[in-house]
């Protein structure tokens, strides 16, 4: 005999880490009465707001602050506790640049560590007035919430790689016939999908634009060499970049690249290698690149990469 649960008892599971953090932040804001509750990510000396519930400060997801300016930095370094009803009683917190910037009087923070011990970021909250000392009794609840969030985060990130493999297989019909690269339709799809992931997990991504000078190719290589030339470039790029990176022929003379989960330092190395390989092969083209701003979109970074490409082309022409 199968028993159905009453509708009032049915609780839908969270689809991902971002949805779970949103629910936790709303609960903490209501339960503890804090002005601001956030989940943040720490990356390359930056403190990035991934998800937020704010009733006072105007904080938005994607906001970025220097990591060492934050109270969370002092907390991770062991200079203060996880629950601080009165920030003025902890020197490191009271002197943190963000304390004055946001008028922080009460503070909560728990680190989010991956299973391998590396720091993802923090679950934290600010309030503009000091709280009673009894608030410290909430620490066991916060620890359980953080453990649950980290478990879901690590599970999400493992599934992410599998999802990417499935997406690549499903996108095989979106291939450019000449080069075998993804086509414009696939490009628009992956821009949207990877942008959502950047936002959800506070991840890096970089864009590269290659503008191919087909007229120069005809002059250099003889009559109508463009198709052979473009196919050679596609093969070269596929050999340089990782399997998870997206390479698409977005126009007859334009190739776009999404370097997923790529920090600025790797972008420089990748662009330099592409330039070196293409220069060695004497392919006439221009390259522009851009890093996704945490407060903006991959689409904005793609636009910036195109603008940088145009600027590089104008510089070469002059």
Image (cartoon, rainbow, N blue to C red):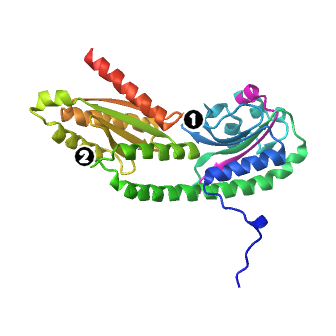
In this rendering, position of residue 176 left or right of residue 9: left
Instruction: Bin the neighbour count of mark 2 within 10 Å (Cα to Cα): few under 14, some 14-19, many 20 and up.
Output: some
Q: Which residue is mark 2?
A: 179
In the rendered image, residue 293, in percent from the top left (x then y), is placed at: 52, 33
Q: Is residue 133 above or below residue 280?
A: below
Write down the quadrant of residue 236 in the picture.
Answer: top left
Task: Indicate left or right for 177 with 295 as reference.
Answer: left
Q: Residue at x 17, y 31 (%)?
A: 217
The segment highlighted magenta reads 98-115
State yes or no: discs 1 and 2 in contact (Cβ < 8 Å): no
* Image location of residue 271, percent across then percent down: 34, 34
Residue 161: within the magenta?
A: no
Q: Which residue is mark 1?
A: 45
User: CA gap, disc 1 to disc 2?
Assistant: 40 Å
Check residue 107 for magenta coloring. Answer: yes
Name the quarter where the C terminus is drawn: top left
**In the figure, 84 relative to 284: above or below?**
below
Mark closer to the chain start, 1 or 2: 1
- Tag 1 secondary structure: loop
Residue at the left extreme of this rendering: 222
Q: Quadrant of residue 151?
A: bottom right
* 27 left or right of 195 in image: right
Residue at the image position 9 percent from the left and 32 percent from the top: 222
Circle 1 packing at 10 Å, graded few (<14), some (14-19), many (20+), is few
Residue 16: in sight, yes or no? yes
Assign a secondary structure to mark 2. loop
Q: Residue furthest top?
A: 318
x 16%, y 41%: residue: 228
Q: Residue 308: image x %, image y %?
A: 38, 25
């Amino acid at each position: 005999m199968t028993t159905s649960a009453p509708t009032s008892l049915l609780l839908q599971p969270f689809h991902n880490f971002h949805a779970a953090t949103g629910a936790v932040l709303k609960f903490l804001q209501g339960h503890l009465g804090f002005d601001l509750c956030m989940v943040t990510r720490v990356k390359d000396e930056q403190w990035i707001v991934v998800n937020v519930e704010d009733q006072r400060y105007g904080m938005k997801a994607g906001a970025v602050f220097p990591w060492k300016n934050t109270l969370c930095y002092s907390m991770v370094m062991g200079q203060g506790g996880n629950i601080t009803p009165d920030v003025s009683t902890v020197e490191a917190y009271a002197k943190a640049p963000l304390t004055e910037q946001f008028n922080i009087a009460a503070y909560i923070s728990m680190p989010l560590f991956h299973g391998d011990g590396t720091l993802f970021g923090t679950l934290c909250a600010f309030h503009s007035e000091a709280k009673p000392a009894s608030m410290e009794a909430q620490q066991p609840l916060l620890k359980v919430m953080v453990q649950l969030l980290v478990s879901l985060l690590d599970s999400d990130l493992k599934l992410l790689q599998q999802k990417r493999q499935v997406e690549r297989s499903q996108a095989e019909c979106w291939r450019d016939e000449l080069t075998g690269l993804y086509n414009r339709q696939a490009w628009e799809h992956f821009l949207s999908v990877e942008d959502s992931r950047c936002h959800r997990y506070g991840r890096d991504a970089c864009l590269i634009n290659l503008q191919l000078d087909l007229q120069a190719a005809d002059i250099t290589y003889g009559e109508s060499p463009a198709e052979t030339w473009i196919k050679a470039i596609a093969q070269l790029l596929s050999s340089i970049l990782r399997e998870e990176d997206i390479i698409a022929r977005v126009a007859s003379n334009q190739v776009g690249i999404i370097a997923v989960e790529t920090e600025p330092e790797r972008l420089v190395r990748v662009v330099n290698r592409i330039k070196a390989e293409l220069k060695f092969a004497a392919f006439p083209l221009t390259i522009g690149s851009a890093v996704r701003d945490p407060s903006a979109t991959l689409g904005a970074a793609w636009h910036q990469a195109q603008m940088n490409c145009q600027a590089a082309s104008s510089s070469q022409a002059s």
